[in-house]
Image: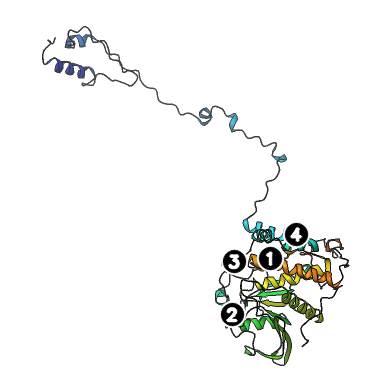
Amino acid sequence: MCSVSGSSSVCVCKVFLRFLGAEGRTLITPSRQTLPDLGSTQYGCAPSDSTLKDQSVTPPPATAPRRQVRLQERRGSNVSLVLDVSSLGTVEPLCSISTPRETILHLLRTSSRPLSAPQLQEAAAQADALDREYQKIPPNFVNSSELDIPGHALKDRYKTILPNPDTRVRLQRAVEEKDGYINANYIRGYGGMVKSYIATQGPMVNTVVDFWEMVWQEDSRIIVMITELKEKKEGEGRFGRFNVSVASLKECDGYTVREFTLQVGAETRLVRHYWCSSWPDHQTLDCAGPLLQLVWDIQERRNALKQPGPTIVHCSAGIGRTGCFIACSIGCLQLQRTGEVDVLGIVCQLRLDRGGMIQTSEQYQFLYQTLALCSRQLSERDGGQRTHTRQSDRAPPEGGRAMTPHLQQHSVPIPDQTPPPTSQCPDL
């Protein structure tokens, strides 16, 4: 027994440590954290050793081995693991997911806005609405990864303006390499007639031979050049196997007409070259009159040819002014033959064939204004009494289905019922 003294606290600690199993006789578990009765004490002293020996220590129960819980027991029931597939036959099929590229092509193929003559006049005066309409048309530019043609960049005037792979012109007689690459595309014309035009970039020093090779291969008899002459392009001289010479020249209001003689060996062909040099890059003409006259002159020339090849049109990049001219040509024919025009549908068709056609919103608005002028000229010429036959009312081609005017296919040009205005340029 300890007396209450200065060493009492030391005595209590020793006894308490012995009880907690310092000699290995007692095990304390988390579930048994209460202390046992230590007997009577005085003044906080611990019992003696004899008192501890008389107390029996109950050993903790043996811990049973833990049984592995199965998956079904952990989830509570095996019912949730059963899948009823009896009703899957009535489930609707999943919708196909369109890629951004497919969405763009679908939009270009289906966009249309046919306008009558009065509607065209009204639309041409709404600059803001036309700007919004233009901004919604996908440009459909081609990524360089889509052209698996080594070294094509050496023949591209602009690295971001490339020919659409599906419609690009392939030179059958390759000049230097096997791929026959040239930055040019076949363009559908009025009624969807294939290969009516070829849109291409302006020839460069290292591509001018390819240009004349394309003219010869496609048997093209009309070239439209809408740019300034800054390089030696379609001028006279020897270009590869071609001898090019000027047979005649005429100056017209806003453009110049040359008759080229293209000779390979003993074979000679005449090619008419229309040069419009007053149209600035990325801009529009000051007035639409000269452009309309150029369109009618070239259409008259095409009608005079028995089997004209594609009309080759180029500016610098081959999409801005080139696109305006081709769109204007198609739109004039629509107005002339149906009394309606679908400018939106025309531009979408052009961009399916060559990305970026009609390069700016100002060019798009100028196209509307030019076609509005064309509509007024046709009405004035006929005294406002023209009877229009809607393209959609005509019977579909044999074996085909009715299409919108800008998608209908024809193997030959539709006969012109109303001749265009008389050419103001003297005949060559």
Residue 269 pos. (x, y %): 74, 88
Q: Which amino acid does label 3 sit on?
A: Glu
Q: Earlier in the sequence, mark 4 or mark 3?
A: 4
Which disc, if any, is residue 365? 1
In this view, the mark in front (3 or 1): 1
In this view, the mark in front (1 or 4): 1
Residue underneath mark 4: 113
Q: In this view, does 370 lie above or below 68?
A: below
In this view, the mark in front (1 or 2): 1
Nearer to me, 294 or 73: 294
Farthest-out residue, left: 6
Corner quadrant of residue 406: bottom right
Which disc, if any, is residue 177? 2
Q: What residue type is labelled 4?
A: Arg
Provide the secondary structure element on which disc 4 rests: loop
> In the rendered image, is residue 287 in sight?
yes
> In the rendered image, is residue 219 in sight?
no
Q: Earlier in the sequence, mark 1 or mark 4?
A: 4
Q: Earlier in the sequence, mark 2 or mark 4?
A: 4
Corner quadrant of residue 120: bottom right
Q: Which amino acid does label 2 sit on?
A: Glu
Which disc, if any, is residue 146? 3
Provide the secondary structure element on which disc 3 rests: helix
Q: Distance between the residues labelled 2 and 4?
A: 44 Å
Which disc, if any, is residue 36? none
Corner quadrant of residue 87: top right
Give the position of the N terminus as an image quadrant: top left
